[in-house]
Amino acid sequence: MHVLIVEDDPIVADVLGMTLEEAGHFKTTANTIETALSELKHNRIDAILLDLNLPNGDGTRLARLVRKNHILVPILVISGNSSIDEKITALGAGADGYLTKPFDRYELMANLDAIMRRSRDHGAATISVGNLVVDPSRNYAKAGETRLELTAKEFQINEFLALRKGAVLSKNAFLNHLYGCIDEPERKIIDVFI
């Protein structure tokens, strides 16, 4: 499993990373919302450990952006704030779990395993259009019995088209789906992808 740690405190990030590596997982670290979004765009991430107090904003903003862009990745919030309102806000923004600091490393791994199990159970739906089958939970598509070798953006385009089958879609709709209003390239990129 590849876990993205979004934490601005390097000591906490290192401890979390060591815990994950000891459990046999890979980790990538980001200390801002923008860095985390870039990692999500360019790497296959299986789960996010998200601190809420980041230097460039509240971590719930990242959770909202992840959900708005239909990125199917479980999010476990790790925060020193134990207030009920903070937990409700984080879960409402799209987090799958909330763990209050300080916590035991075994408690962290148990929570991470639990949200991973739930995400696999609920993400099993596939989208079919003709002989095209798109599986968003496993990021693969196949035409008939042939698995398609797609880049991340090509997969997102196929998923978007399958979800909106029969609809006329604008270039802006594609740009919003692919980039979520963040670092959007020129509109011509959609012609290149198509």
Image (cartoon, helix red, strand yellow):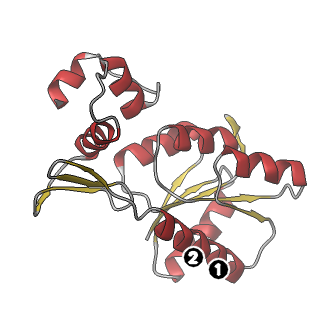
Question: How busy is the neighbourhood of tag 2: few (under 14 within 10 Å), some, or many (20 plus)?
Answer: few
Quadrant containing the C terminus is top left
Quadrant containing the N terminus is bottom left
Tag 1 near tag 2, CB within 8 Å:
yes
Q: Is residue 23 left or right of residue 191?
A: right
Residue in the picture at 28% in, 22% down: 168
* Residue 106 quadrant: bottom right
Three-letter code for the amino acid on which mark 1 is drawn = Ala
Label 2: which secondary element: helix
Q: Is residue 181 above or below residue 29?
A: above
Please name the residue that numbered disc 1 is placed on.
110
Question: How busy is the neighbourhood of tag 1: few (under 14 within 10 Å), some, or many (20 plus)?
Answer: few
Q: Nearer the viewer, residue 75 or 128?
A: 128
- Residue projecting furthest to the right: 83
Q: Nearer the viewer, residue 6 or 164?
A: 164
Q: Is residue 153 left or right of residue 86?
A: left
Q: Is residue 185 above or below residue 87?
A: above
Label 1: which secondary element: helix
* Picture coordinates of residue 21, whole percent (x, y): 50, 76
* Picture coordinates of residue 113, whole percent (x, y): 57, 76
Whether residue 32 is visible: no
Residue in the picture at 14% in, 52% down: 131
* Picture coordinates of residue 4, whole percent (x, y): 51, 58
- Residue 94's disc is none
Residue in the picture at 43% in, 58% down: 45
**What number of labels is visible?**
2
Please name the residue that numbered disc 2 is placed on.
113
Question: Gap in Å between the C-alphas at discs 1 and 2?
Answer: 5 Å
